[in-house]
Amino acid sequence: MILEPRTNTPLWMTISAPVLAVVVVLILSGGLIAWAGAPLLESYVALVKGAFGSRFAISETLVRATPLILTGLAAAVAFRAKLWNIGGEGQLYMGALAATYFGTGLVSLPMPLMIPFLFLVGAIAGGVLLLVPALLKTRLKVDEVVTTLLLNFIILLLANYLLFGPWKDPMSMGWPQGAPIIDEGVLPNLVAKTRLHGGLIFSLIAAVCVFILMTKTRWGLEIRAVGHNVDAARFAGIPINKTVIRTALISGGLAACAGVTEVAGTKGYLTLDISPGFGYTGIAVAMLAGLNPLGVIVAALFIAGIYNGADSMSRTMDVSNYIADVITAASLLMVMLAVMLTRMRIRWR
């Protein structure tokens, strides 16, 4: 048995392969649900209802998908240039810290200016944070996987220090949380009696902008060229180091904007648990989407729906909600296998 490249991949195969891979994962995951002693069909019905079965369920899925879209975009942009940004979690918290610092009274602007200002300072903070590993990579050849991963813990410890110390809200009854964002900086609510906020609109616009950047601009071409073949890109006159640094600023800024949406939209103030791992899950979102910015939206909705639905299934069917982690991880592996098979064919000898 050997693998050989396909000369031509039909469009139907490109579209159907990831969908079929997810269906296979759901079928295989059914074995775990049955092993837990729950009826399979009723469990999956509960999962779907928990994710999309009501206005409240849909809104909660969209709330969860909002930061995943932004962290997924951050990973997709960085990975296109083979900048292995594993620090989305730290960059998310960096954006949240910046939004808290400027948005709790230090700066007061009308709402049409205050909200863009918070996203701007958050994006700058996240971009500068990823700039450090990018410079270490371009100047000293330091592996960015290690540096971005370790920066996650540094930023989390910084947030922990601030919330237990100088930034602790005296009105929080002893809980470690920051002061609330001023009213002018709070993202508007989109649906009454839900938590759905304007961060969803921002994330969708960001996905479209990143798609245009990557497919229609010179910067996008340079990013893709550096990721595809560094030597060829250098021969073509593309500035490698500048492209990597530019990519780092964009990627870090996108991940940080996810922190801004959580502080200024979902919570209204900074806490240590604003992210249950959105930065790490964003990597899975980007890979499931094939690093396509528009595909990131679909992948984020899928993963958010799986997690929200698994919580509902856990309550109604007494099935562990960790099944969501299994489905997400298995989907990632299966989709990667399916994508590989759309590009390669198996030939038996």
Image (cartoon, rainbow, N blue to C red):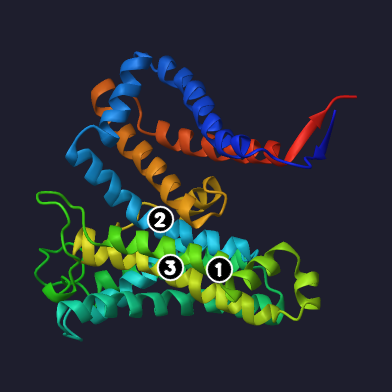
Label 2: few (<14), some (14–19) or many (≥20) C-alpha neighbours in 10 Å: many
Relative vertical location of residue 244 with respect to residue 333 in this rendering, above or below: below
Tell me the element at label 3.
helix
Q: In this view, does 326 lie to the left or right of 186?
A: right
Can see residue 163? yes
Residue at point 14% right, 64% down?
A: 174
Distance CA(mark 3)–CA(mark 1): 19 Å
Q: Which of the image's four quarters has the C terminus?
A: top right
Tell me the element at label 1.
helix
Q: Which amino acid does label 1 sit on?
A: Lys
Residue at point 34% right, 80% down?
A: 121
Instruction: Give the image location of residue 347, x and y in percent.
Output: 83, 29
Q: Nearer the viewer, mark 3 or mark 1?
A: 1
Location of residue 301 (image quadrant): top left
* Residue nearest the observer in this picture, 85 or 25: 25
Instruction: Give the image location of residue 187, x and y in percent.
Output: 20, 66
Residue at point 26% right, 29% down?
A: 49
Instruction: Name the residue that disc number 2 marks.
Output: 69
Q: Nearer the viewer, mark 2 or mark 1?
A: 1
Q: In this view, does 27 lie to the left or right of 171?
A: right
Residue at point 75% right, 39% down?
A: 344
Say if mark 2 contacts mark 1, CB within 8 Å.
Answer: no
Location of residue 243 (image quadrant): bottom right
Distance CA(mark 2)–CA(mark 1): 21 Å
Tell me the element at label 2.
helix
